[in-house]
Every structure is written in structure tokens, then in C-alpha cells.
Image (spheres, grey):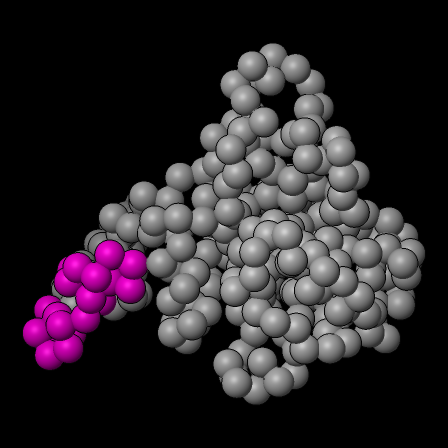
Amino acid sequence: MQPLGVSATPTLVTTARDEEERAGRAAAILDALLAVIFSPACAACDKPLEHPSLGPVCGTCWRSILPLTPPLCEVCGDSLATWCASTVAVRCVRCRRSRPTIDCARAIGSYEGALRAIVHALKYEGRRSLANRLAALMRVRGAEILANADCVVPVPLHRSRLRARGFNQAVDLARPLGPPVCHALYRVRATTAQTGLPASRRHGNVRNAFAATGKGHVLKGAIVVLVDDVSTTGATLEACARALKSHGVREVRALTAARAVRPPR
């Protein structure tokens, strides 16, 4: 029987601390075994992983992913010239001229360096575990995009490409973001991969390539967030946004893991 006035808290704290220390030692042993047996390299920088149990990308590469430098265009998220920092609600020259269908877009960072390598590892090497870490960064750096959203809509793959790849990276990125995932779009036709096309042909390549599914028809008046791995010219996101707004979606935002940065204007 425990004496009166004696608290059990120190014992509980000590036990918890002991468990943490044991878990830390076990992780260190596991990392050492994985490093010796498999000699895994970072999927981004190709250097040996010190802690393979934490994932296929080293901490240095994750920490090197910087946010886009403000000021940013209020619509597409491109960096603006520094003189725009003192103004309010500024759009870049392209958005003022083209009046995009996307209401607001943001990304973790620029499509280069470690972020580019990580996206490639997810998309082309099937390192699907990377989607959760990327989504965590998307939640932080795209908080304003996700705020008050009714759902997130992953950009769909055509069924032929989905069969070949085995998964849709946009779906993997969308699931951990928080709002419900709604498969509101489908690809009407197969298109040439955007990566192999010059910017001048990308909009034409995906024009009328998307349509609303049965779920898309019930989003009238909703605020939705399109999710994809990369935005380069924004052509795919624009095509998706047009399909959604044609069925009454009130506001279409976009959140991607990376964005191809164009010179500030």
C-alpha cells in the first residue's frame, strides 16, 4: 500500500523516460543494421543515409527545401519583383493578362534541387512513403489554401497511365492534407506527358481533357483545392479548374508539392 502523501508521478515519469531511451537505442541499432546490410543512399542527394529507418531521404535534404521568396502573386504564387512588397493584393503580369480560372495557388517550394529529386523519387521510383512528409510540408506552407476548403480534389491520371504506374501520386499527396478527398474529376482522354512538351503546347495538350464525375456534380457552391505534385505552366490545373467551375464550384484553389519558378515580374 502506498504511504499517504507520496506521489506516484516520479515513477511514471521515470518509466516513460526509460521507454523513450529504449526506443532510441532500438532505433539506433536498427539504423546501424540497415546501413551495414543494405547501404541505402538518400533518394535526393545519393549520400549514405545515417538513419534509414526515418525514410529514404536524409534530414539535410529535407531541411534544404526553402519556401518561395515573398512577395508572391496573390493568384499563381510566383515570386514578384521586390518593389511589390509594399503594395497590397498584387498580381503578376501573367495573371493580370490571362485572368486564370484558378483563384489562388501555392506550393512547398521551387521545383529544383532536393525537392525536385524527392518528387521524382515519389513519382517515378514508387517511393510512396515520401508523400506523407511532402503533404506535411504542404499543410504548413499551404495553410491559407486549405483554410475553409470543403474538399481536396487530386488531379486524375488517365486509366492507361494509372495502370502503368500503379498509383496516382496526387491521391497520395491529397489524403494526409486534412479536408475530405473527393474524386471529382476524370480524364476524358489520354494526353501526351506534359514534361515532354514546350510551354507553348501544354495548354492545348490538356484542353477539354477533364470532366466532372458524379461526385463533381454535387460540389456546386463549394470551395475545392486541386492537388498535384508539380505545377510548371499551370496548364493542367487550369484545365481541371475549368471543368469544376463549369459545374458550379464557387472557388478553385491549387496546392502542389513544387512549382517551376519563373523570373519575377
**Image spot of residue 154 (x, y percent):** 65, 65
Q: Nearer the viewer, residue 32 or 90?
A: 90
Q: Is residue 51 covered in magenta?
A: yes
Q: Quadrant of the C terminus?
A: top right
Is any atom of residue 238 visible in this view? yes
Is any atom of residue 226 visible in this view? no
Q: Quadrant of the N terminus?
A: bottom left
Q: Residue at x 52, y 18 (%)?
A: 82
Q: Is residue 100 left or right of residue 257?
A: right
Q: Is residue 30 covered in magenta?
A: no
Q: Nearer the viewer, residue 124 or 203?
A: 203
**Image spot of residue 32 (x, y percent):** 10, 69
Examine the rendered structure and indicate whether residue 240 appears above or below residue 81: below
Give the quarter of the image for residue 219. Answer: bottom right
Q: Main secondary structure of the magenta part?
A: loop
Q: Nearer the viewer, residue 115 or 39?
A: 115
Q: Nearer the viewer, residue 41 or 26?
A: 41
Span shown in magenta: 32-52
Q: Residue at x 46, y 44 (%)?
A: 110
Give the quarter of the image for residue 235. Answer: bottom right
Q: Is residue 143 left or right of residue 148?
A: left
**Image spot of residue 140 (x, y percent):** 52, 44
Q: Residue at x 77, y 55 (%)?
A: 241
**Image spot of residue 76 (x, y percent):** 65, 40
Q: Residue at x 53, y 38 (%)?
A: 262
Q: How many marks?
A: 0
